[in-house]
Image (tube, rainbow, N blue to C red):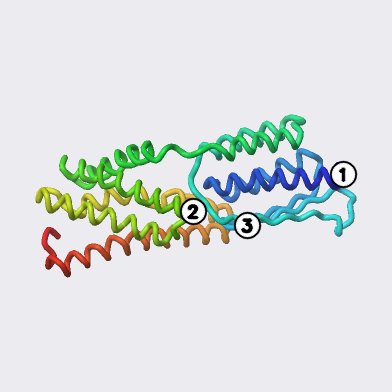
Amino acid sequence: MNEIDSKKLLKMTLYTAEILLQSGAETYRVEDTIVRMCTSRGFDYVESFVTPTGIFLSLNNKGDKPEDIITLVRRIKSRSINLNRVAKVNDFSRQFVSSDMSIEEAFNILKDIDKIKPYPALIHAIFGGIASAFVTLLFGANIFEFMAAFITSIMVTFSIKNLDKISFPPFLTNISGGCVATIFAIIFASLYPAIRIDMVVVGAIMVMVPGVAITNAVRDSISGDLISGLAKAAEAVIIATSIAFGVGFILQLWILISGGKLL
């Protein structure tokens, strides 16, 4: 493979890794995909270093001089959870490795995968609301708290989705989500005294809990990717802290206004 084709392969592999990382894939999965795709085209020197915020990739042909090594770096600025994209990129990488697919064809497939949109906000909100509502039952909620958590969770989902659209800082977005959950919980508790604020809040904030980040942090740490593990653990702690800050801020404000009524 000549130098031009090597650079095309490098760019295509980097694009694959970028989609995986932005969609919430684990670090080991991204690095393993890079190595398999490059070695399938005859490169015997492939080094990749992936963190949640960047991808570093170098490759070289056997017998080439060290100064001929090609290296690219890609900065990852945004991340979300889209397991559908992760699954499709996995299928694509297996197909690429086991066939003689051209790089141009691979680029076209990746562009189609990159265009896949997440579920509509309405679907996300409804099913997030159902999950949140059933969580309250685990803590002994009654039917009114179940319904209040369902509605509150929907409102929280819509609020954080709208803030994401205007590129609101993630830390402030989660604070806002915690505030919205607590405000609606107080409103429902004011309208119907049988509703406990804590039950509604616990259920409603479930749509923001960083479960995938915590799971990936543990998975990366166990596999030896300590930097990625610590980075994702820090991300999970920051998200959890911001949610708690939003909830605590509104509760403290409510105590100052009402003297702790309904709490």
* Location of residue 137 by image quarter: top left
Image quarter hosting the C terminus: bottom left
- Residue bearing the label numbered 1: 2
The amino acid type found where label 2 is placed reads Val
What is the x, y in percent for residue 234?
A: 47, 62
Q: Is residue 73 left or right of residue 146?
A: right
Q: Are circles 2 and 3 on residues that touch, CB within 8 Å?
A: no
The residues bearing labels 1 and 2 have C-alpha atoms spaced at a distance of 41 Å
The amino acid type found where label 1 is placed reads Asn
What is the x, y in percent for residue 256?
A: 17, 70
Q: Nearer the viewer, residue 182 or 226?
A: 182
- Element under label 2? helix
Q: Look at the picture and state if 7 lies above or below 182.
A: above
The residues bearing labels 2 and 3 have C-alpha atoms spaced at a distance of 23 Å
Q: Are circles 3 and 1 on residues that touch, CB within 8 Å?
A: no
- Element under label 1? loop
Q: Is residue 66 left or right of residue 122?
A: right
- Residue bearing the label numbered 2: 218
* Location of residue 173 by image quarter: bottom left
Q: Residues within 10 Å of mark 2 (few under 14, many from 20)?
A: some
Q: Are circles 1 and 2 on residues that touch, CB within 8 Å?
A: no
Residue at image coords 27%, 53%:
181
Image quarter hosting the N terminus: top right
Q: Which of disc 1 and disc 3 is earlier in sequence?
A: 1
- Residue bearing the label numbered 3: 75
Residue at image coords 28%, 55%:
180
Q: Which residue lies furthest to the bottom in this view?
A: 256
- Element under label 3? strand
The residues bearing labels 3 and 1 have C-alpha atoms spaced at a distance of 26 Å
The amino acid type found where label 3 is placed reads Arg
